[in-house]
Amino acid sequence: MTSKPPILPTGQPATKRRILTGDTPTGRLHLGHFVGSLENRIRLQGEYDCYFLLANMHAFTTRAERFADIRQDTIEIVKDWLAAGIDPGRSTIVLQTEVPAIAELSWFFAMLVPFNRVMRNPTLKTEIESKGLGDSYSFGFPMYAVGQCADILAFRPDLVPVGVDQVAHIEMCREIARRFNQVYCAVDTHAEDQRHESLGGVFPIPAALVGRVGRLVGTDGKQKMSKSLDNAIFLSDTPKQVKKKIGAMYPGQTRDPDQPGDPDINPVFDYADIFVKDQAFVADLRERYRKGDNLGDGHIKAYVIEAVNELLDPIRERRARFEGPGGDDTVIDIIRAGTRRANAVAEETLAMAKERMGLNFGARAEMLGTER
Ligand code: TRP
């Protein structure tokens, strides 16, 4: 078994505070993921001890028969992460299905939340609708929301960087953490969230950290950017694909370049706000657009295309290292090394939780017969 990290007199491990977040491997990542969460993860890598989870178990909740796709999507999403700037030397990449503590905690947590509370989760409801699951979704599907609480709490993190659509899950996670600490660690029901750990709770009450753009509009100019809506610009798109997708965007209105236009209903301006670095320049473009100062939509798109490609160029360069023969194997090695590190933390959490629950009958290694 792995050794536990040292514990400071304050009760905190002698390591940096932690971050946990993850993605379900359902396909390639796009710009919405980047500005919604990835950007934050990359920025916080130095400051925090970061765990990035491949939620491959969750992929099975809606695609159990498509196991081969799930395996490949899992590998591809790691390529997206590494390309985007996640550094496996500093951060830990975790494969959910090889962290048994997560599955075990999921069961215990499922007993601390009413069934109806889970089913009221707005993110689940939206997903049932948008994925057309009707009433024939698997029993495991709503279970993933409880599982996500275990993903998070297994690492006892302070922060969970996510897009807005995930905030409902984090809220449920906070409720479960409070409840566990109250039921099994005698933390007072009125205790402030920040004091739970110092009052003896096993779990911190983690906070969601939403990226600078909560919801990025897709190239259809209407709905949220999403692979399934076919309105996404992927981190792996070529410069040509980016040019084509942005070039085809409807500017929200029909206008002549020398007639006044409304930049506020033009989704290309949303992208200009988010991706063009020189914001004084964008403000000037808006002004000219409003006046009808002979500013064609193609012009604005050209600036946006350039800005997006500037963002994606270094990502493309880094990705090239993992493409071609041997790329998948390199990725799998990174997953294995990370998951091993992750299990040290998750096993420690599970042991702490079971101890408080009166389930300390014997050490894990003894029970599994793997002690040396
Ligand atoms: N449900 C998240 C998504 O689809 C992925 C996820 C799984 C996650 N476990 C997590 C996100 C834990 C944050 C924390 O994007």
Image (tube, rainbow, N blue to C red):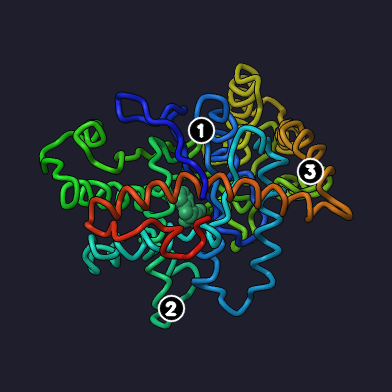
Q: Which residue is identified by label 3?
A: 319
In this view, 154 is above or below 140: above
Q: Residues within 10 Å of mark 2 (few under 14, many from 20)?
A: few
Q: Position of residue 183 (x, y in %)?
A: 16, 52
Amino acid type of the residue that numbered disc 2 sits on in the rendered structure: Tyr
In this figure, which residue is indicated by the disc labeled 2?
137
Determine contact: label 1, label 3, CB under 8 Å: no
Q: Nearer the viewer, residue 222 or 132?
A: 132
Could you tell me the amino acid type at mark 3?
A: Arg
Compute the Cα span from label 1 to label 3: 24 Å
- Tell me the SS state at disc 3: helix
Residue 180: x, y in percent?
23, 51
Q: Give the residue drawn at x 43%, y 78%.
A: 137
> Which residue, as the protein is rendered here, is positioned at the far front?
372
Q: In x, y percent, where is residue 108?
A: 30, 62
Q: Residue at x 70, y 41 (%)?
A: 82
Can you tell which mark lies on residue 49?
A: 1
Nearer the observer: mark 2 or 1; the answer is 1
- Asked if the residues shown at circle 2 and circle 1 are in contact, with their CB atoms under 8 angstroms apart, the answer is no
Q: As rendered, which of 46 and 254 lies closer to the eye?
A: 46
**Residue 122 screen position, x and y as percent:** 34, 59
Query: Which residue is at 48% across, 67% downward?
Result: 130
Label 1: how many Cα within 10 Å (few below 14, some 14–19, many 20+): some
* Rendered image: mark on residue 12: none
**Element assignment for label 1:** strand
Q: CB of residue at label 3: within 8 Å of ligand 1?
A: no
Q: Amino acid at mark 1?
A: Asp
Q: In whole angstroms, how far apart are the C-alphas of marks 2 and 1? A: 36 Å
Between marks 2 and 3, how big is the CA–CA gap?
A: 36 Å
